[in-house]
Image: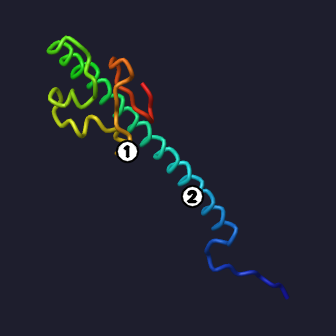
Amino acid sequence: MSVSRHRDGGFSFVELMTIIVIVGVLVGIAIATYTASIERAGAVACENNRRFIERVSLAEYRIDHGTSPSTLDDLAPYAVNWNAVRACPTGDEYLLFLDAGGQHVVCPKHGR
């Protein structure tokens, strides 16, 4: 008398757990990459805003007035959509500001 094992075709518990672990690792890598990409994009957008203010608005102000502005708000007439440009895109609490000499625009989060 021989005993035959009959399997109904399906996956074993170990096979299912292996697939779940592999998918979990891939999702973890994807989330980490996505988060890093979002942070880099925010830093690049902040840098672009800072450069725009520094190279366009600040330069136009100096041409018109012959001196550096005392505050960043003095540059508002020289930029379209000023409220969006002067805030760091990664958070509304980070507002760009002029350094002590009024020569450069600085972000408290990303620096100069």
**Residue type at mark 2?**
Val
Is disc 2 placed on a helix, strand or loop? helix
Q: Are marks 1 and 2 in contact (CB under 8 Å)?
A: no
Please name the colour scheme applied to the rendered image: rainbow
For residue 60, above or below residue 40: above
Q: Could you tell me which residue is drawn at 34 percent across and 37 percent down?
A: 95
**Residue type at mark 1?**
Glu
| Count of marks placed on residues | 2
Closer to viewer: mark 1 or mark 2? 1
Left or right of 9, for residue 66: left
Is disc 1 placed on a helix, strand or loop? loop
Residue 110: % across, % down: 44, 32
Q: Residue furthest bottom?
A: 1
Residue 12: % across, % down: 67, 72
Residue 27: % across, % down: 53, 54
Q: How many neighbours does mark 2 have within 10 angstroms: few (below 14), some (14-19), or many (20 or more)?
A: few
Q: Residue furthest front?
A: 70
Which quadrant of the figure has residue 60? top left
- How far is mark 1 from mark 2, CA to CA? 37 Å
Q: Relative to the observer, which residue lies in front, 88 or 15?
A: 88
Left or right of 89, for residue 33: right
Left or right of 31, for residue 12: right
Which quadrant of the figure has residue 103? top left
Tell me the quadrant of the picture where the N terminus can be found.
bottom right
Residue 93: image tag: 1
1 or 2: tag closer to the N-terminus? 2
Q: Residue furthest right?
A: 1
Q: How many neighbours does mark 1 have within 10 angstroms: few (below 14), some (14-19), or many (20 or more)?
A: few
Residue 23: image tag: 2
Q: Relative to the observer, which residue lies in front, 21 or 100?
A: 100
